[in-house]
Amino acid sequence: MNIFLIALTIVLYLVTTAILGYRFFLLKLAGGEHKWQLLPACSLALILHAIVLYQNIMVPEGINLGFYHAFSLMSWAVVMLVCVTVIFKPVENLALFFLPVAALSLGLTVMFPVERIISDSYTLGLQFHILLSITAFSLFVMAALQAIILSIQVHQLKNKHPVRMMHILPPLQIMEELLVQLLAIGFFLLSLSLATGLMFVHDVFAQHLAHKTVLSISGWLVFAVVLWGRWSWGWRGRKLVVWTLGGFISLLLAYFGSKLVLELILQRV
């Protein structure tokens, strides 16, 4: 049953991606048109993905957050946030990038079933901390992609050589406003995540979490500077993009760099 659900979910993600690609690149429809056609298939894929995640992560021994399961959980959260955002803003273009990644993450959990069991000690506190961390990181993933797209848009406008993709992206102002909103919400959730981590995760040095904590705090500081610069000095364009990507890289190393080294290279669980 698990394999069947995974296969069906992957197919739904890829079919939805193909439909979006057809609309954007062949029909040249702008973002916001027929968005309600995207949501049913994407919502069904998210529900099936959630069932698979529950079966794989909630195990009798505790919570299984192995590298690929964590990657799959993050990708699910990102796709869910994209689908919710699509209701209010014409950003279907983001789904073109994240739906295939979500499909890939499911395939990797089948091919490489790495386990990282978190015992049920401090269950409620840890679950709350994990939920906040995943949601915050997912928002910053979206923000990083927004920053990259925004950088491309600014570059094309300055050089007055817009590529075809420019015509299907939302206006520059909407993209910039969405980026700042994502950063603000993500920063708030990351702050709560760091606070709950200090409350519920004890003896971080013994748990090989010191580097993760330092990198997370570094990312938090970078995003604090980004928001301060935006609201105090009106940062826009390249400066906003560079600082956003710098903070994201720090968080990426904190969330996945440490897991990659500890679980896949050093084989520590």
Image: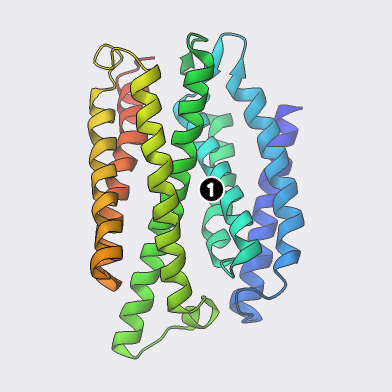
Q: Position of residue 38 (x, y in %)?
A: 71, 62
Depth check, front residue: 128 or 145: 128
**Mark 1 Cα-neighbour bin, 10 Å: few <14, some 14–19, many ≥20:** many
Q: Quadrant of the N terminus?
A: top right
Residue ID at (29%, 47%): 249
The residue labelled by disc 1 is 78
Q: How many circles with numbers are drawn on the protein?
A: 1
Judging from the image, the colouring scheme is: rainbow
Q: Position of residue 140 (x, y in %)?
A: 41, 50
The amino acid type of the residue labelled 1 equals Val
Q: Quadrant of the C terminus?
A: top left
Depth check, front residue: 185 or 101: 185
Looking at the image, is 175 positioned above or below residue 168? Answer: above
Residue ID at (70%, 49%): 11
Q: From this viewpoint, is residue 238 visible? A: yes
Q: From this viewpoint, is residue 115 visible? A: no
Looking at the image, is 92 positioned above or below residue 199? Answer: below
Quadrant of the rendered image containing residue 207: top left
Q: Position of residue 82 (x, y in %)?
A: 57, 55
Depth check, front residue: 6 or 121: 121
Residue placed furthest toward the bottom: 160
Residue ID at (25%, 65%): 232
In this rendering, would 225 be left or right of 122?
Answer: left
Residue ID at (58%, 42%): 76
Q: Position of residue 24 (x, y in %)?
A: 61, 75
In this rendering, would 26 be left or right of 73?
Answer: right
In this rendering, would 8 be left or right of 173?
Answer: right
Q: Could you tell me which secondary element the residue under label 1 belongs to?
A: helix
